[in-house]
């Protein structure tokens, strides 16, 4: 049975899915009909962060142009350019057994591609969620129900290591300065 998470809630994966090594992270959203004159393209980026809140090396930043982390633990399954259709719009596979020992957090951020130029924000997006799966079985899901009326980037959630155990936190924190803010913060 899947756990429905609320903003800020944390779960211990060792308790919820004992023995879990490979977790699939599905993210989804639906752009609202709008008059911005161009399609929406939302992108998932993954920051693998060390104890100093920095990525240990460039290839620990995973996105549509770098689909596999340096340690092979995180694999981005591809960029969905429209968000159309049912189910997950973008999928990230994480092999927890391969995560580099320097990495303490794996952060999932969704941004709107060229948001400023296209005059788009998350207030024009609905049904946003992040979910964790063990194979086809959903472990937990967090549906973002906040109104991100000016934000162009949202931190959906994060996997993090605590006392030798991987946990997940539903974050739901937005930024109106796009992906650049996160890149500057973690590099």
Image (cartoon, rainbow, N blue to C red):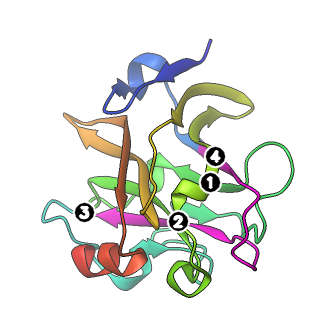
State yes or no: residue 46 in magenta.
yes
Residue 45: x %, y % from top left: 50, 68
Bounds of the magenta span? Answer: 24-49
Which mark is on residue 125?
Answer: 1
Alpha-carbon span between mark 3 and mark 2: 34 Å
Residue 15 painted magenta: no
Give the Cα distance between marks 1 and 3: 35 Å
Measure the alpha-carbon separation of dots 3 and 4: 35 Å
Residue plotted at (78% across, 67% down): 82
Task: Tell me whether the residue at label 4 lies in contact with that at label 1, contact meaning CB atoms closer than 8 angstroms.
Answer: yes
Q: List the residue tagged with mark 4.
A: 126
Q: Main secondary structure of the magenta part?
A: strand
Q: How packed is label 3: few (under 14 Cα within 10 Å), some, or many (20 or more)?
A: few
Would you name the residue on which mark 2 appears? 121
Where is mark 3, residue-wise?
102
Element type at mark 2: loop
């Amino acid at each position: 049975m899947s756990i429905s998470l609320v903003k800020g809630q944390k779960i211990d994966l060792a308790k919820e899915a004992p023995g879990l090594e490979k977790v699939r992270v599905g993210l989804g959203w639906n752009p609202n009909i709008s008059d911005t004159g161009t399609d929406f393209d939302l992108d998932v980026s993954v920051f693998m962060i060390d104890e100093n809140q920095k990525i240990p090396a460039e290839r620990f930043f995973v996105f549509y142009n770098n689909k596999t982390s340096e340690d092979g633990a995180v694999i981005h399954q591809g960029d969905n350019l429209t968000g159309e259709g049912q189910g997950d719009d973008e999928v990230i596979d994480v092999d927890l057994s391969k995560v580099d020992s320097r990495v303490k957090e794996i952060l999932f951020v969704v941004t709107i591609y060229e948001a400023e130029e296209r005059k788009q924000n998350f207030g024009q997006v609905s049904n946003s969620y992040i979910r964790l799966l063990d194979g086809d079985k959903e472990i937990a899901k967090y549906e973002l129900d906040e109104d991100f009326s000016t934000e162009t980037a949202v931190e959906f959630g994060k996997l993090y290591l605590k006392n030798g155990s991987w946990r997940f936190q539903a974050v739901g924190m937005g930024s109106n300065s796009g992906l650049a803010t996160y890149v500057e913060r973690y590099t």
